[in-house]
Image (cartoon, grey):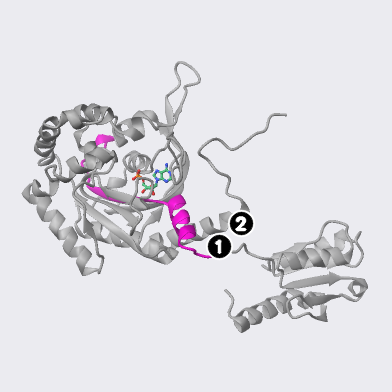
Amino acid sequence: MPTFKAPRGTRDLLPPDRTGWSRLERIAADLAARYGYREIETPLFEQTEVFERGVGAVTDVVEKELFRIAPRTEESESWALRPEPTAGIVRAYVQHGMQTWPQPVRLTLRGPMFRYDRPQAGRYRQFWQFDVEAIGDPGPAVDAELIELGLRFYREAGLDGVDVLLNSIGDATCRPAYVDELSAYYRAHVDRLPALERDRLERNPLRLLDSKEPVMAELNALAPKITERLCEPCAGHFAAVRAHLDAVGVGFRLEPTLVRGLDYYTRTAFEFYRRGAEGQQQALGGGGRYDGLVELLGGRPTPAIGFGIGLDRVILALEASGAPQVPEPRPVAVVVGADPAATIERLQVATELRAAGIAARAELGQRKLGKQLEAAAREHAHFAVIVGDELADGQVQLKDLEAGTQRLVVLADLPRELARAHASHRHGVGED
Ligand code: AMP
């Protein structure tokens, strides 16, 4: 037999690990709802052109990393797995006429993204994002609200010391002249550029600014800065974003070389990093304004802003910071029995408990009572319900596995007894 493995760059999240993810998903969902973001789901794949237009043809994400699905027949469409959520959400905004809804439309999504990149620590081919988008508001207040939401997510997740790196990358009025100036600057130093950067210089010079090539650091430090070349409206917008961030107590660091990898961004651009962990695969999230995207995908000109937070990296950062593992939920009760063969009775009792809303597992194997109790203790169940001869009188034994006590309980009272004893125990020892 061949040995099968999860594809390169993907992972199975096994039950002990999945709990940490569920916790983050819950925090994300609660937070998004608290800020008025409504849930949306879009397909995991779209027509390739949605990404080619929406993400930008001259980006790594589309050129090199798009998971393309080969058409099955000549006529069939070309699809790709989503590398990021914004293009699909904006496609949905246009398709469903959301421009007629009250603006801005605040949307949130959590789910897997796919990029055919070289896997390494913190970089996977399937990874998860918590995404929020506010479509139909030019800002600047909503920009600050969204950045503050992102920071609050890390805080509520228990990750301290997350910084906001902030920039404005202008718009169609001021950016072209800046890009020309930037090209001229790099051209004057073309002999120092690595091959890939030379190629980028021809196709998308802005990308050189976020190059991670060591030789570029020095060149980039002296490159013309977009923030000094913004047109009046963009400069005013940027100043107002900063004022709103100040007003809600969000500290930030201006980072003039922050340009974001995706083409559709305008004005506000930001990334989240953990202090002291600002390397290439360490961005914990990022986002920005994309005032041109709705039109690019066939809608009316509509300003918008959003971010994507990488949940895989938040999990890694939490582990690195020594955060305790999130325990799996444990059963309140395990239904065991003196007669190994009496599976019908055990299944019936457990079914009643579950119908009453109690987390209960029945021992459905046919092993001895001692082994059944051992298994219940291993799962850290609070109680064992022991089904025995007393069942004929409508009673069972209720054993408190933590206190080591045991008493007879009338079957009809069992759900209420269990719920009460479990609740008073939890309050008593202050567990969650
Ligand atoms: P981006 O759209 O590239 O800015 O991605 C937004 C966030 O998603 C990043 O800040 C990362 O936290 C996360 N992310 C992006 N690509 C990957 C990847 N290949 N593996 C894990 N996380 C990723």
Q: Residues within 10 Å of mark 2 (few under 14, many from 20)?
A: few
Residue wearing tag 2: 16
Q: What residue range appears in magenta?
A: 295-324
Residue type at mark 2: give it.
Pro
Query: Residue 381 location, x and y as percent?
Result: 72, 69
Residue wearing tag 1: 325
- Residue 318 on the magenta span: yes
Is residue 97 visible in the rendered image? The answer is yes
Residue ID at (84%, 56%): 365
Left or right of 233, for residue 66: right
Left or right of 2, for residue 153: left
Task: Kindly identify which numbered label has been placed on residue 431.
Answer: none
Residue type at mark 1: give it.
Gln
Vertical position of residue 191 compared to residue 357: above or below: above
Q: Is mark 2 within 8 Å of ligand 1?
A: no
Q: Quadrant of the C terminus?
A: bottom right
For ligand 1, give the image quadrant.
top left
